[in-house]
Image: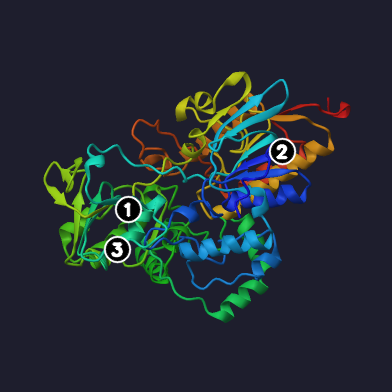
Amino acid sequence: MNETHVKLSNFDAVVVGAGFAGMYMLHRLREAGFSTRVFESGAGVGGVWYWNRYPGARCDVESIYYNYMFSEELYKGWTWTHKYPDQTEILNYLNYVADTLDLRRDIQFETKITSAHYDEANKQWNIKTDKGNSLTAKYFITGVGCISASHIPKFTGLDSFKGEWYHTAHWPHKDVNFKNKKVGIIGTGSSGIQAIPVIAKKAAHLTVFQRTPQYSLPARNQPLDPEYVQNIKERFQEIRKDARASRNGYSLNATTLSTQEVTHEEREKKYEELWQMGGVGVVQLAFNNILTNEAANETCANFVKKKIQEIVKDPVIAEKLSPTYPIAAKRIVLDTDYYETYNRDNVTLVDVKKAPIIEVTPKGLRTTDEEYDLDILIFATGFDGMTGPLLRMDIRGKDGVSLKEKWENGSQTRTYLGIANAGFPNFFMITGPESPSVLGNVPVAIEQHVDWIANCLEYLKANRIETIEASKEAEEKWSRHCQEVAQNTLYVKTDSWYTGANIEGKPKRFPIYAGGYGTYREICDEIAIKNYEGFIFVGVPLEQN
């Protein structure tokens, strides 16, 4: 139930978002005795999984790992049905967690935080919502996710379109009827690749407008065997330990071999085995230098491109679908029959890099080459990632400086650990910029951040510390380190939503820590052990002065 009738005043903590991050943050803080209120723009829990209801929406992380792992009881109380969970099942899971932990009583739904300004005199955050609520909190914590700020390019004429149009990130809470309809979809990122095969089976005709082809690997999704599920539940402690220590939050056995240590035939055999297995293994399990060595990367990329050419019957279309950048420099996509869909008679692929979109017309869409009649237009154009969800709120720290000003609108995004910001006391970000966040299984990254923040707040409370703030020196050092680590990978060689290249006018920067989940956890733990090295306290006890 939405408890908008509750009188809002002062809280120990205000949390933004009721997805994986906000829900666990609420649970941890409530258990620690902090009065906490969560604000969620949706009408229910789930975060991006509440909004992303487009056809074919499915997670690209195996369900047995895509869980909270802070509670063995919670883990064992839920049973997934498929290797890769779909949107409905993930949302059901998050509702199960909300019910089990009785979280909804401290969440205000259908409410957006519009502003959060730090009050230096009173050492508190003054917060306002779009429902007219004004409240204060000692701690302001964002759990808005890295890809929750949807993006629609500014196409001329969209208001004139006479048909229906939708964005994959804000899909209607009802089925969209594609039968006998001419459908156009713009974008071939993860959401587009998942939606295209499903829509193609229902629509009279589907036109795909592609700017940049993606590497997509077969998911080989299948129902989970009950015996396998039971075995996984019995191995909970082992899986949890491995996931937390791993590079990307999976309990997978990565190889120690490089591509140079095997013959061409052995390489191809390994790639083929992992391709048939399905999932991300071709990139993440085959060899250890795919993301750091261009020659090694090329062997993997060429293997996938050969697969595209084998699957897609028309060699011209196969060529259009073949990427030219390093594989995995953008987030790898998993699919079910994506490339096979282009063999259908009712599917057309349009290269909008070659023939750019000029405008949306009343009847459809026009490129420099042709006009396309459409009944339904779908934007699978992704998100203003990493910084976008944060900068869409008016967050202001000391001296009234906004986060947008501090980060110079993204050109100089700097944080300490992706958790805190110099000049913004008692402000914490869950999986913020310059944390490992999206380079793996995000719930594992979320849990690590939430636990660290909750432990930090308990430390502050026990030591009567009023405020905590990252020092400029620690922030600059961490930001430099993030860039140095990234330069040793191929992530920085490619335009992607990681770098903000999908947003017109957004400065390009790789604001993610690429050193791996396990290494990052060790760094954060060491900082906490050293009494939160790199942070500035106000109200520090005498023995720490």
Q: How many marks?
A: 3
Left of 522 or right of it: where is 56?
Answer: left
* Amino acid identity at mark 3: Asn
**Badge 2 local density, few (<14 within 10 Å), some, or many (20+)?**
some
Q: Quadrant of the C terminus?
A: top right
| Residue at 51% in and 76% down | 224
Residue 173 visible to the viewer: yes
- Vertical relation: 358 (above or below) 475: below
Q: Is residue 10 above or below residue 398?
A: below
x, y percent for residue 387: 49, 36
Counting residues from the start of the chain, the first of labels 2 and 3 encountered is 2
- Residue at numbered disc 2: 11
Q: Nearer the viewer, mark 2 or mark 1?
A: 2
The answer to whether marks 2 and 1 mark residues whose Cβ atoms lie closer than 8 Å is: no
- Place of residue 13 in the rendered image (x, y in percent of width and height, measured from the top left): 69, 39
What amino acid is found at the position of numbered circle 2 in the picture?
Phe
Quadrant of the rendering where the N terminus is positioned: bottom right
Work out how far the residue at label 1 is from the one at label 3, CA to CA, in angstroms: 27 Å
Judged from the image, the secondary structure of the residue bearing numbered disc 1 is: loop
Secondary element at tag 3: loop
Q: Which image quadrant for residue 264?
A: bottom left
**Residue 202: horizontal and vertical position, in percent?**
26, 67
Q: Residue at x 51, y 66 (%)?
A: 89
Q: Which residue is mark 3?
A: 177
Q: Along the line of sight, which residue is nearer the eye, 368 or 237? A: 368
In this image, 406 relative to 186: left or right? right
Q: Farthest bottom residue? A: 227
- Look at the image and name its color scheme: rainbow
Distance in Å between CA atoms under marks 2 and 1? 45 Å
Task: Single out the residue that lies furthest toward the top.
Answer: 399
- Which residue is tagged 1? 214
User: Residue 527 placed where, x, y %?
Assistant: 71, 38
